[in-house]
Image (cartoon, rainbow, N blue to C red):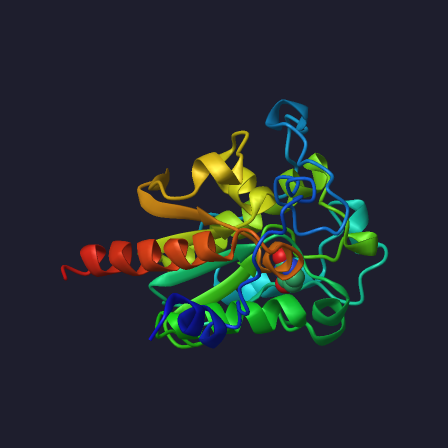
Amino acid sequence: MTADDILREMGLGPVWKLRATPAAAPVEESAASSPAAFPSVQEIAPACVTAVDAAMTWDELATTVAACRQCRLCEARKQAVLGVGDANADWLFVGEGPGAEEDQRGEPFVGQAGKLLDNRLAAIGLRRGENVYIANAVKCRPPENRTPAPEEAAACRPYLERQIELIRPKLIVALGRPAAQTLLQTEVKIGAARGKLHDYRGIPLIVTYHPAYLLRTLLDKAKAWEDLCFMRRTMQARKGG
Ligand code: URA
């Protein structure tokens, strides 16, 4: 089986070749269709007022998130999207925020980007809901699918933190720059951050491209495959082979 066949099976093919005069290099990835950079952490509101009890159960967390009004994203949402999957999963995938279909259906990654995510999971023998949990950095849809603002990401972060405490995954995969920056609380450039093992409070964390970015970009698909292999190797090592 060739590399092209593998990429096609992942839903990442066909592989396009650059023409003699290449177009401008793709902007560092963002899930949003406009290439707005994620704001620096220094800009993030210093005081986050979202109250999440350290003993909060899944049910309490779900009720709190559903009723959350800590930032302006609540104004236009149809519903908050907490996450989906196995509450004791080894794998946690974190995206940016719900889009229109996710807002409508109440589940993360159910649109085009979600189909690609499911294909990427299948490529390493995973299925949504089976030892996998999928969440987002922000739980409410940013209007026009824009990148979440720093104060929105900061207000929502305690929910993600509580989810991670409850799930206790063996590996976290940050899908795209906003997810990576929210989790790592530092400026991230995907090109520099991918291929390395990061740490979220003692849990290994891998940064990779957001599926929406891969849908738009032709150049980074082989790298996305490398990232999948790195994830699988890391999990195998965590489980002891
Ligand atoms: N993009 C995301 O980051 N999350 C979703 O749930 C859907 C699209």
Q: In the displayed structure, does residue 20 sit left or right of residue 7?
A: right
Which residue is outermost to the left? 240
Does 187 sit above or below residue 75? above
Q: Closest to the observer: 186 or 37?
A: 37
Q: Which image quadrant: the N terminus? A: bottom left
Q: Which image quadrant for residue 71? A: top right
Counting from the top left corner in percent of width and height, residue 204 is at 33, 46
Q: In the displayed structure, does residue 218 sit left or right of residue 71?
A: left
Q: In the displayed structure, does residue 80 sit left or right of residue 73?
A: left
The image quadrant in which ligand 1 is located = bottom right
Does 204 sit above or below residue 125? above
Q: Closest to the observer: 50 or 120?
A: 120
Counting from the top left corner in percent of width and height, residue 115 is at 59, 73
Q: Count all numbered tags in the image, as a single digit.
A: 0
- Residue shown at 53%/72% (left/top)? 11
Q: In the displayed structure, does residue 143 sit left or right of residue 168?
A: right
Counting from the top left corner in percent of width and height, residue 26 is at 65, 43
